[in-house]
Image (cartoon, grey):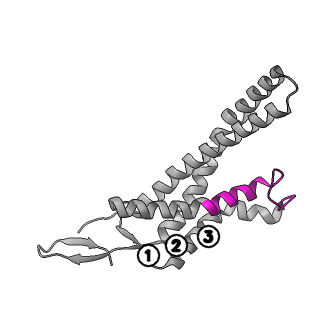
Amino acid sequence: MRVVLPGQVAVAPRRQTSARVAAAVAGAAWPPLILTLPFWPPSTWTPGPEMDWRLMILLVGLIATPLCLWRLARERERHGRPATRLGVVWRFVFYGGLLAAGLQALVALAMAVAGWLEAGDPAQALGFTETTLLIFGVGFLPVAVMVGISYALWAGLCAAFIAYEPQAEAPDRMNRVVRRTI
């Protein structure tokens, strides 16, 4: 008898579009964000520079989760991977960490450029750039990556269990068990 560890069972994407939509919405609805909104309502719901950071992260999740599902579908067409739920979750975590680091670096650079435009002289601009890059580029980068990875872990688990289903097993001519897509 073959022992299969959790997450190692072969899976295939569900054919229904509704499963991918449900996985994307459930993955974007990260519980720490959703649960804090009623207790600490955002000061403004409108998009812009004063928008609450939780709403910005929720917006990023609503865009990134379907994009990651699309990326996994293209990867599966080319290479046949990810073939297990663990592979789906791992790819979400990897891409989520990269996205969080990239977005944090982009925010730090945008804030530095905004500081240049507001500075009175080049020395003041240089000082603002140093402070901004140190705080947002170095200090907040590990925090952003940790938040991105935990958000992506949630989205990956939702995708692995909602958008993917176990593959059926069928014996072949040699009486071995072979995985086959339904």
Q: Which residue is disc 3 drawn over?
A: 25
- The Cα atoms of the two marked residues, 1 and 3, are separated by 16 Å
**Residue type, mark 1 in image:** Arg
Q: Position of residue 69 (x, y in %)?
A: 50, 64
> Alpha carbon of mark 2 to alpha carbon of mark 3: how far?
9 Å
Q: Quadrant of residue 154?
A: bottom right
Disc 2 crowd, CA 10 A, few/some/many (<14, 14-19, 20+): many
* 129 sits to left or right of 88: right
Q: Mark on residue 14?
A: 1
Q: Which residue type does callout 3 highlight?
A: Val
Report x, y in % for residue 48. 81, 54
7 relative to 55 in the view: left or right: left
Q: Specify which label sits upstream in the sequence, 1 or 3.
A: 1
Looking at the rendering, the stretch of residues picked out in magenta corresponds to: 40-63
Question: In the rendered structure, which amino acid carries the disc numbered 2?
Answer: Arg
Q: Which residue is mark 2?
A: 20
Q: Is residue 179 above or below residue 39?
A: below
Instruction: Work out whether mark 2 precedes mark 1 in sequence or the reverse, and give the earlier one.
Output: 1
In the image, residue 100 above or below residue 181: above
**Rendered image quadrant of residue 83:** bottom left
Element marked by disc 2: helix
Answer whether residue 13 is magenta in the image: no
45 part of magenta stretch: yes
Residues marked 2 and 1 touching at CB (< 8 Å) = yes
State the image coordinates of residue 57 (x, y, percent, origin top left).
69, 56
